[in-house]
Image (spheres, rainbow, N blue to C red):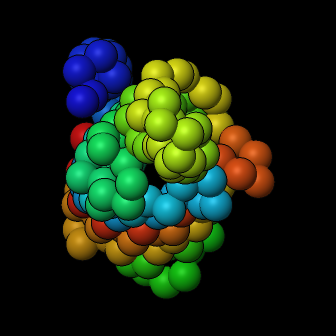
Amino acid sequence: MLRKPAKLLLLMVAGLTIPMSHAADFYAVAGAQHSRSVKLLDVSGAGHHVGAGYVINQDWSVEVSAESLFSDAENKGITSLDSDALTLAILGKTKLDASSVFFYRAGISQIKHQASFYAQPREVVAADGKTVQVRDLTTVDDKLVHGVFGFGLEQNFSDRWLGRVEIIRTFKNDEIGADSLRLSLGYRF
């Protein structure tokens, strides 16, 4: 799960809330997301995220978040899948009206993938001379750095509370990546 990234994020949030002279510039967000892998594996599933950010000015923010992309992956030949990420992103913002903001994000994400799946079938000649198809169980346990791009809408409910809906693409190359739809609730300190 998100044990190490969540602990790191909690420490960062605690550190961010200490300088109370600029407390209104800090915020926290948490929510749910649904992700779908791109090309290499056909997997989709629910996940969650928690993050903290700092408002640089009315047009820019920086945000760090811990995410679980596929905590509940639908089984499509994959026996298990766990993809946890720690992401650093910058957000550009454009005010649409008094309470709505369009934003986009760009950043980097370190994703730890742990998966088990059956490889493509291969033919093997059995001891009796017959040809049979065999599928080997393959395991993956790695950490990769991915790029992150996305955009969304932020709705301010009050001076402190906000809601977000956004679409995010996390990618390593044309074969490795995920598209996510994210819903978040946030609080400004």
> 155 or 51: nearer the eye?
51
Compared to 47, does 28 lie above or below?
above
| Residue at far front of view | 128
Q: Residue at x 55, y 82 (%)?
A: 96
Q: Residue at x 53, y 46 (%)?
A: 130
Q: Where does residue 146 sit, x and y in percent of width and height?
A: 64, 37
Q: Report whether residue 168 is seen.
A: no
Compared to 28, does 72 lie above or below?
below
Q: Where does residue 118 sit, x and y in percent of width and height?
A: 44, 43
> In which quadrant will I find the N terminus?
top left
Quarter location, residue 182: bottom left
Q: Report whether residue 127 is seen.
A: yes
> In which quadrant will I find the C terminus?
top left
Compared to 71, does 153 lie above or below?
below
Q: Where does residue 139 sit, x and y in percent of width and height?
A: 44, 28
Quarter location, residue 90: top right
Q: Residue at x 52, y 22 (%)?
A: 142
> 114 or 162: nearer the eye?
114
Q: Residue at x 27, y 28 (%)?
A: 2
> Count of labels shown?
0
Q: Where does residue 98 sit, x and y in percent of width and height?
A: 43, 80
Quarter location, residue 19: top left
> 17 or 28: nearer the eye?
28
Compared to 10, does 179 lie above or below?
below
> 75 or 100: nearer the eye?
75
Q: Is residue 89 left or right of residue 85?
A: right
| Residue at far bottom of view | 97
